[in-house]
Image (cartoon, grey):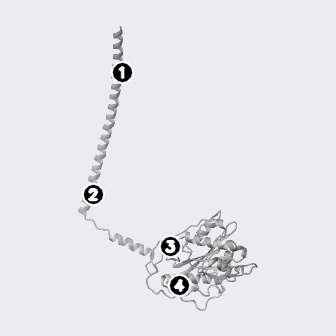
Amino acid sequence: MALFNYATKEITIKIVYYGPGLSGKTTNLQYLHSVLDPNSKGKLLSLATEADRTLFFDFLPVELGKINDFSIRFQLYTVPGQVRYNATRKLVLKGADAVVFVADSQREMKEQNIESFSNMRENLQENNIKPDDIPVVLQYNKRDLPNIMSANEMSRDLNGNGKYEYRESVAIHGTGVEETFRRITTLVLQGIARRHKISVKTPGEFVDMPATEKPVEAPVVNEPVAEAPLSMPVFEMPRFENTNVDAGIVQATYEFDETKNSPSEPAIEEVAAQKVFKEIREIPVIPPEKLDAMVSGITEMSRTLKDLKNLFTDIHSEIRDSRKEQKELNIMLKEIRRDFDRIKLKKRWFRFS
């Protein structure tokens, strides 16, 4: 689900490009990064493995306006296509709001497409995301190559029930890349509008404008229907801040903001201060005589505990002395028994003499 960050006043939407190895996921992100406004996009980060790469960048389209004073930020990820990097794919897919599945149109890639699509659904479920509830757009890439499957053939393999929309593309030339991105962002924003009863004007032109052009009139985002603040969890979107590639596994550092104030509430510091002052005011005042009685009671209890400690010490000392005396008595009894045995022996001597 989209994440609301009340500290930065941003709604973060995570879109993941999924698919088999070398299907064109990286090419999609590289092309989008090259055509978007440089003032509204972050750096294109790459986590390299032996056979594939995980890419990431974020994009803040100012043309979309704001929703209830919140800016909309898109985070775009790719995943490694190789099966051996499934742990990385599962990690990148965590918290996704939408998926673009990039399928390779070459006929020999049919099985890899089906396997990767099935793996995507499994990893969504592993991340507690229902595969049928998240927006998914299929992109049939590499349509310029020979020996490719028709769109109907690919739909029978990946979209048998016709649930998902698809776009045909040649990502290396940018054909269909912007259209796919525009459609997936539209589906995500429509989902947010339905869930939170917000009227949002979906994006139409912010991805196909040259970076140097500005819109004649910025699209307007209507105010929420209800005046109640959006009831969304308050924490920051996990970002790859410290990354290490070890056998293809990405280790990510996550940061969460657990504050729970809404956009219409005071600042976090002010709310915290008010809460402290309220708790101080609510502490009951104890009368002096009652406080003296409590102190006397605690002192008397402390004295009683001290006396009990001394008593236990004396008892322990007596027990130790008793054990010592008992040991001495045992020694004496053993000596008496030995003497008695000697007397009996001597008595037998006199009997035979």
The residue under label 4 is 66
Is the residue under label 4 in contact with that under label 3 (CB below 8 Å)?
no
Q: Image point 26% across, 61% down: which residue? A: 291
Q: Secondary structure at mark 1?
A: helix
- The earlier-in-sequence mark between 2 and 1 is 2
Q: Secondary structure at mark 2?
A: helix
Determine if residue 45 is in view. no
Q: Nearer the viewer, mark 1 or mark 4?
A: 1
Q: Image point 70% across, 78% down: which residue? A: 105
**Percent coordinates x, y for residue 64 in the rendering:** 57, 85
- The earlier-in-sequence mark between 3 and 4 is 4
Is the residue under label 4 in contact with that under label 1 (CB below 8 Å)?
no
Q: What's the amino acid at mark 1?
A: Arg
Q: What's the amino acid at mark 2?
A: Val
Label 3 vs label 2: CA separation?
46 Å
**Percent coordinates x, y for residue 29 in the rendering:** 66, 77
**Quadrant of the image for the C terminus?**
top left
Label 2 vs label 1: CA separation?
65 Å
Q: Nearer the viewer, mark 1 or mark 3?
A: 1
The residue under label 1 is 338
- The earlier-in-sequence mark between 1 and 4 is 4
Please name whichever residue, 114 or 216, is drawn nearer the observer in this view of the structure: 114
Residue 205 drawn above or below residue 333: below
- The earlier-in-sequence mark between 4 and 2 is 4
Label 3 vs label 4: CA separation?
19 Å
Q: Nearer the viewer, mark 3 or mark 2?
A: 3
Label placed on residue 235:
3
Label placed on residue 169:
none
The residue under label 2 is 295
Label 1 vs label 3: CA separation?
87 Å
Q: Determine the image quadrant of residue 12.
A: bottom right
